[in-house]
Image (cartoon, grey):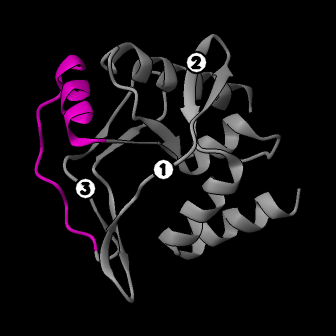
């Protein structure tokens, strides 16, 4: 777990180093958010970052990453979407203006209402409140997301 924590901190540090200082609309979500904001023993496979398109484009430019075409997915879409390999870290996935497909209402934007500051090692990042993390995981609705909801609720 120690190596995972070091890799996670390296990725979070990479994110904060390249996120524009005026970007106040970004969050870590998914398993990385659970790992850094709870006592749940979970090993993230990547660090998911959501923000508006402008912030993500600026982040990619600051990180020296070319803007790639977004990949179509039946349950969610964003522009841009990009996966970035981080040296000595966990891959970072950035999603601009993320939308999730709702069975009743079609594509709906993910609008995060809460923003909590989390210090992980020496790095400060932001996550939704745990209740909102649960809501987001349920909206994604995949089996792996619903398993994370069970982990959170079991603590």
| 106 in the magenta segment | no
Q: Which of marks 3 and 1 is in front?
A: 1
Q: Mark 3 points at which residue?
A: 78
Which residue is at a point 26% across and 31% down the rendered structure image?
55
Specify the segment rendered in magenta.
52-73
Mark before the other along the chain sequence, 3 or 1: 3
Give whichever of discs 2 and 1 has the lower sequence position.
1
State whether residue 43 appears in this view: no
Which residue does the image show at 68% across and 69% down from the upper left? 147
Q: Does 34 sit left or right of 60 as displayed?
A: right
Q: Is residue 73 above or below residue 151?
A: below
Q: Which residue position holds label 2?
A: 124
Does dot 3 land on a helix, a strand or a loop?
A: loop
Question: CA separation, marks 3 and 2?
Answer: 25 Å
Query: Residue at left 48%, top 50%?
Result: 112
Check disc 1 and report the residue beneath it: 112
């Amino acid at each position: 777990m120690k190596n995972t924590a070091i890799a996670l901190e390296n990725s979070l540090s990479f994110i904060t180093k390249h996120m524009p200082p005026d970007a106040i609309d970004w969050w870590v979500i998914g398993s990385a958010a659970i790992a850094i904001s709870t006592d749940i023993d979970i090993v993230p496979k990547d660090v998911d970052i959501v923000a508006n398109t402008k912030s993500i484009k600026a982040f990619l430019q600051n990180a020296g990453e070319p803007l790639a075409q977004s990949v179509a997915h039946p349950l969610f879409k964003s522009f841009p979407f990009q996966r970035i390999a981080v040296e000595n870290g966990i891959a970072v996935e950035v999603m601009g203006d993320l939308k999730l497909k709702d069975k009743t209402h079609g594509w709906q934007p993910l609008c995060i209402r809460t923003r909590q500051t989390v210090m992980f090692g020496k790095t400060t990042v932001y996550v939704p409140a745990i209740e909102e993390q649960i809501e987001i995981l349920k909206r994604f609705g995949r089996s792996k997301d619903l398993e994370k909801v069970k982990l959170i609720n079991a603590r």
